């Protein structure tokens, strides 16, 4: 079983550390002795333990999935994992885990935390509510750690970071990057124009215009992914992906056409549009002239697809 400190637990519960300490004191699980919080017998019964740090001395830790209201935290004895536990397994933050799960369409951000979607139910997620903060959260069976969809997104993120580092170094040396043999004609330009612009939410995009689009989506709280592979046989990637949810039956894709004076680029655009049309994907198109008034134009286009702009 995984244990976390009271401060880390407060972060998981989306509440102030001082409020959680007060809550645990009220419950009779901890008490203060000589300006140090210590476990009571009741706290030990609830799963609390004591750890020792060479620098800070003794401190209290709790089961990572501890319940304050005695709700069942597992199904049929199976261990359920929180975003924090999943993040520790993959060495990423719990915030990043939730963003990835929302990109997959398994959870969606609500007023009171993260809520499970119908697709998330397929993967046996369990919706719960923090008794202390009232925030919604989702726990997952341990097989999520080997789920091919989740691993695919994590692998894409890792590879994107590696490729970005290598290609940025290549550009600095004025060397043309080599196109991978597995890259098709449709997306060969992804190797030719490597991502160099960092957005507010940490994505690395290929142009200032894409940076503006990504930052717009981030500012307005719209869950999105950058360069997600289309669910097709063709090796084709969208510019931006907005998962289904919040009343939308299907995902929405955004394409920014920024090199329309290039004949090869126009051919790529034509082929990509054929793929979108053939598969019936919901598509928003943006061109360079619209960047000057992006706020109004993209807001209008998103609303047409039932995407609320906060």
Image (spheres, helix red, strand yellow):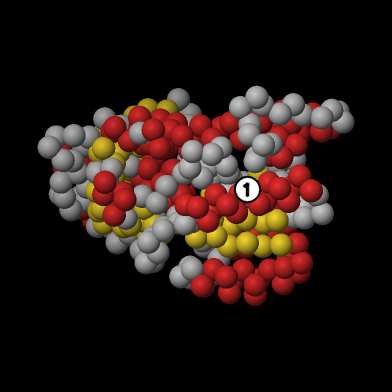
Residue 43 position in % (x across, y down):
20, 42
Is 158 above or below relative to 29?
above
For this view, does 295 lie left or right of residue 78? right
Which residue is label 1 attached to?
Answer: 271
Q: Residue furthest left?
A: 76
Figure quadrant of the N terminus: top left
Residue 176 at least partly seen: yes
Residue 25 at least partly seen: no
Query: 8 or 148: which is nearer to us?
Result: 148
Residue 237 position in % (x across, y down):
58, 44
Query: 117 or 301: which is nearer to us?
Result: 301
Looking at the image, how many numbered discs can be counted on the residues?
Answer: 1
Q: Residue at x 35, y 29 (%)?
A: 146
Q: Residues within 10 Å of mark 1 (few under 14, many from 20)?
A: some
Query: 293 or 26: which is nearer to us?
Result: 293
Q: Residue at x 29, y 54 (%)?
A: 118
For this view, does 69 lie left or right of residue 146? left
For this view, does 39 lie left or right of residue 20? left
Is 7 above or below relative to 156?
below
Query: 42 or 270: which is nearer to us?
Result: 270
For this view, does 18 lie left or right of residue 260? left
Q: Residue at x 12, y 37 (%)?
A: 76
Residue 157 position in % (x across, y down):
55, 37
* Label 1 SS: helix
Q: Residue at x 37, y 28 (%)?
A: 52
Where residue 19 sits, quadrant-wise, is bottom left
């Amino acid at each position: 079983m995984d244990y976390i400190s009271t401060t880390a637990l407060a972060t998981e519960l989306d509440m102030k550390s001082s409020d959680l300490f007060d809550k645990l004191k009220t419950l009779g699980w901890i008490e203060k002795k000589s300006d140090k919080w210590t476990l009571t017998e009741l706290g030990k019964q609830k799963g609390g333990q004591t750890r020792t740090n060479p620098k800070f001395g003794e401190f209290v830790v709790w089961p990572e999935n501890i319940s304050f209201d005695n709700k069942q935290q597992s199904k049929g004895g199976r261990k359920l994992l929180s975003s924090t536990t999943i993040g520790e397994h993959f060495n990423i933050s719990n915030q990043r885990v939730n963003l990835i799960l929302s990109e997959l369409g398994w959870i969606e951000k609500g007023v009171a935390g993260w809520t499970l979607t119908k697709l998330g139910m397929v993967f046996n997620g369990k919706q719960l509510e923090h008794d202390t903060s009232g925030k919604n959260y989702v726990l997952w069976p341990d097989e999520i750690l080997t789920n091919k969809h989740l691993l695919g997104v994590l692998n894409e993120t890792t590879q994107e970071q590696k490729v970005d580092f290598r290609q940025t170094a290549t550009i600095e040396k004025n060397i043309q990057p080599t196109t991978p043999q597995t890259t098709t004609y449709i997306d060969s330009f992804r190797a030719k124009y490597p991502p160099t612009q960092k957005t507010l939410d940490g994505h690395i995009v290929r142009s200032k215009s894409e940076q503006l689009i990504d930052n717009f989506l981030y500012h307005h709280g719209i869950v999105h992914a950058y360069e997600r592979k289309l669910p097709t046989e063709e090796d084709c990637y969208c510019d931006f992906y907005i998962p289904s949810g919040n009343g939308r039956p299907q995902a929405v894709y955004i394409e920014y056409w920024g090199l329309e004076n290039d004949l090869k680029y126009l051919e790529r655009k034509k082929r990509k549009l054929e793929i979108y049309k053939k598969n019936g994907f919901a598509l928003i198109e943006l061109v360079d002239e619209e960047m000057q008034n992006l706020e109004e134009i993209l807001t209008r286009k998103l609303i047409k697809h039932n995407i609320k702009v906060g």
